[in-house]
Amino acid sequence: QQPVQSPQAVILREGEDAVINCSSSKALYSVHWYRQKHGEAPVFLMILLKGGEQKGHEKISASFNEKKQQSSLYLTASQLSYSGTYFCGTDPGANNLFFGTGTRLTVIP
Amino acid sequence: DGGITQSPKYLFRKEGQNVTLSCEQNLNHDAMYWYRQDPGQGLRLIYYSQIVNDFQKGDIAEGYSVSREKKESFPLTVTSAQKNPTAFYLCASSIEGGQGNQPQHFGDGTRLSIL
């Protein structure tokens, strides 16, 4: 039930945009997004609920297409502080989350 | 400040030894979780607890045990039956369990290594 994330890694220059995708084979009630910096705890970014909503958090936003069981995280005008590994966590109604293997994002000056 | 405290930050285990990782939260959250993180594999659920005195196995529970005697504490024991325990262990909590609309808050993790 682990979701599939793509790409596995991406390198950006400051100011560039990126999209990270998360796809599940199961019907989903919600999708969570977290960012983890090396050796630190994952930090919650946002939750998208069933209903196909889109949410934003500063210059980071996300969408959730429940029919396709997919979510995408959009990072615009990237900053150095955006570097880290991004995880999606999917909820198929199983009382817990299933996390993807992560997308390593590196922003360079 | 409210949060989740994991200790120790680094832990070493000898062959055949059981070790216990501590996780304490003062967020008044009902649900708590233990994850294992290996390089390139994301987070895998070991055990979770939605309420005091109750817990369920996750995807990789073999070789691990937990207890939930107090709301704020959810210790994880890595037993000698766990043959490959070297990993980064993360504890998390959420306001309620079984609710996909609740974010999970993570501790800073414990890195366990075999001597």
Image: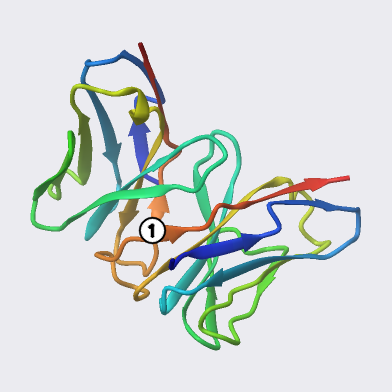
Q: Residues within 10 Å of mark 1 (few under 14, many from 20)?
A: many
Q: Position of residue B3 (x, y in %)?
A: 46, 65
| x, y percent for residue B104 | 38, 61
Which of the image's four quarters has the C terminus of chain A?
Answer: top left
Q: Quadrant of residue A6?
A: top left
Q: Position of residue B47 (x, y in %)?
A: 56, 67
Please tell me whether residue B40 is drawn above or below residue A90 in the rendered image: above
Amino acid residing under circle 1: Leu
Q: Is residue A27 left or right of residue A87?
A: left
Q: Is residue B99 visible?
A: yes
- Left/right placement of residue A13 relative to residue B31 reads left
Residue sitting at x 50%, y 48%: A41
Label 1 sits on residue = A97
Residue A21 placement, left or right of A58: right
Would you identify the image quadrant in which residue A12 lies? top left
Q: Secondary structure at mark 1?
A: loop
For image coordinates 52% across by 52% down, the residue present is: B44
Chain letter of disc 1 in the image: A
Pick the front one: A80 or A61: A80
Residue at x 71% of width, y 58% of height: B8
Residue B1: quarter of image: bottom left
